[in-house]
Image: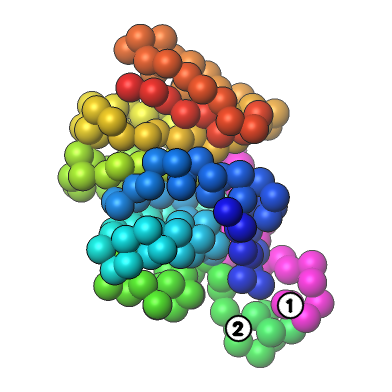
Amino acid sequence: MKYRVYWRKTCMRPDMGSKFLEIVNKKRPKNFLEIGVYTGVSARNICDLQSKLYNNDFNYLGIDLFEDYKPSDEKEIAPNYIISNNQYLSNPLKHLVYNIILKEQLNSIKSVNNFLKNYKNNVRLIKGNSIEVLPTIDLSIYDMIFIDGGHSYETISSELKLIHKNCKKNCLILVDDYFHREAPGIKKAVDEIVKENNYKLQVHYNRFAEIIL
């Protein structure tokens, strides 16, 4: 599986993104939930894969704060480029196009929706805090849930508790950055829910933690 960056900013290098897509492809999810959409690159790759598998019969839901993100919580870590009015693009041409000509904030919900417009009938984006949004949606319909939003222990732990109570038995729960040195709370939260519920844990590529229910 080849992960494409589509000339946008992304937190996942193409080689690791391709490995991520291999995990997704093995599950073959018709209904996918992603927490932490950023600029929509992973979302686009997921939808591309789902489209190949199911034509137009699939659903993708993405939850993110989008341009409303504010770096007010020191426990969270986030790339500078997702902070509103501070979109850093090291590529001079990208800087010219997105920041000067288009004046487009790549992680805004408008930008991501436009980026995913080919799948507008399959995609739903919700702007908001995942802890507030998750209780309002039917988690039991999702075949795979990818957690890559807030990186604090409190956020990950709360998300996992909400998900494990309401997801279906064979749902694949995948958490990014399990061994992130600057965010040890991710591993702590994952290990706790695995131990408390006697789940199994499989770590892929020294990065993605799969919680096996």
Decide which of tag 2 and tag 1 comes sooner along the chain. 1
Residue 83 lies in the magenta-colored region: yes
Q: Position of residue 86 (x, y in %)?
A: 66, 66
Q: Provide the residue span drawn in magenta.
A: 73-95
Image quarter in which the C terminus is found: top left
Q: Is residue 107 left or right of residue 87?
A: left
Image quarter in which the N terminus is found: bottom right
Label 1 Cα neighbours within 10 Å, binned few <14 / some 14-19 / many ≥20: some
Query: Is residue 185 visible to us here?
Result: no
Residue at the (30%, 52%) spot, across then down: 30
Q: Is residue 70 above or below residue 125?
A: above
Q: Position of residue 121 (x, y in %)?
A: 27, 72
Decide which of 27, 65 is in the foreground and name it: 27
Query: Residue 103, labelled with which disc?
Result: 2
Type of amino acid under label 1 = His
Residue 40 lies in the magenta-colored region: no
- Which residue carries the number 1 mark? 95
| Badge 1 element | helix
